Image (cartoon, helix red, strand yellow):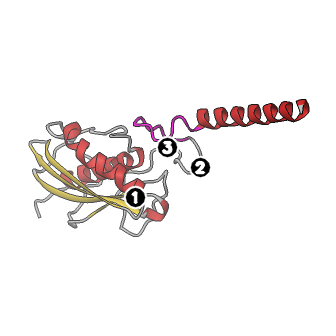
């Protein structure tokens, strides 16, 4: 009987230790302060080219891209002298560009006067990040100059922020284009 009790206590202790270990590992899951992982799925963090895509490229998690939705011409470089207007862009990211955000941006006097973001994803988790990003980003960029504007992780959405920054890069090139012809 004593051996049985001893064995039962050992089993219970081992089970408790396992639960404590699992609990501490999972303790950060669901946290409001998401931190990107540093693995093959998190992207390299390296900046990719801000040159506009023709629309056919692939966007991996670490390689967001942007395409124009309005077909405006682009300048070969950001001049810093921007035409007032509305710019419609799409930032793509995720596996083969499967996730995307439509970015509508109004400029006046070189300042962002309005921004609207609409996310597109098949993943409920990604859609949640996109929705939180779309609600938060106007407060981050509206009223600020487009020149050198870049967002960091907004509302915990690091990949969405990266795709948004690519859309800003393309907006600068479109807004810099010579429209005299």
Mark 2 residue element? loop
Residue located at (22% from left, 62% from top): 73
- Few, some or many C-alpha atoms within 10 Å of disc 3 (few <14, some 14-19, many ≥20)? few
Residue 56 horizontal side relative to residue 73, left or right = right
- In-front residue for pair 51/99: 99
Q: Mark 1 or 3 closer to N-term?
A: 3
Q: Is residue 44 visible?
A: yes
Which residue position holds label 2? 40
Task: Specify the label residue 46 is tagged with.
Answer: 3
**Corner quadrant of residue 108:** top left
Magenta-highlighted residues: 26-37
Relative to 35, does residue 87 appear above or below in the rendering?
A: below
Q: Are marks 1 and 2 in contact (CB under 8 Å)?
A: no
Q: Observer-nearest residue: 137 or 3?
A: 3
As rendered, which of 46 and 7 lies closer to the eye? 7
Percent position (x, y) of residue 144? 17, 36
Nearer to me, 178 or 175: 175
Mark sitting on residue 87: none
Say the numbered circle drawn on residue 124. Answer: 1
Density class for disc 2 (Cα within 10 Å; few <14, some 14-19, many ≥20) is few
């Amino acid at each position: 009987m004593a051996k049985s009790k001893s064995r039962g206590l050992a089993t219970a202790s081992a089970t408790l230790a396992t639960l404590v270990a699992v609990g501490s590992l999972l303790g950060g899951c669901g946290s409001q302060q998401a931190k990107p992982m540093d693995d093959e799925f998190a992207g390299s963090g390296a900046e990719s080219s801000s040159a506009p895509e023709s629309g056919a490229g692939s966007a991996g998690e670490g390689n967001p891209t942007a395409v124009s939705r309005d077909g405006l011409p682009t300048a070969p470089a950001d001049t810093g002298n921007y035409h007032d207007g509305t710019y419609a862009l799409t930032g793509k990211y995720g596996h083969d560009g499967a996730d995307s955000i439509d970015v509508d941006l109004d400029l006046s006097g070189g300042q962002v006067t309005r921004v609207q973001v609409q996310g597109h994803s098949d993943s409920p988790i990604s859609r949640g990040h996109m929705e939180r990003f779309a609600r938060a980003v106007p407060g981050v960029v509206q009223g600020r100059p487009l020149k050198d504007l870049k967002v960091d992780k907004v509302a915990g959405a690091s990949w969405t922020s990266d795709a948004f920054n690519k859309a800003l890069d393309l907006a600068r090139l479109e807004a810099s284009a010579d429209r005299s012809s």
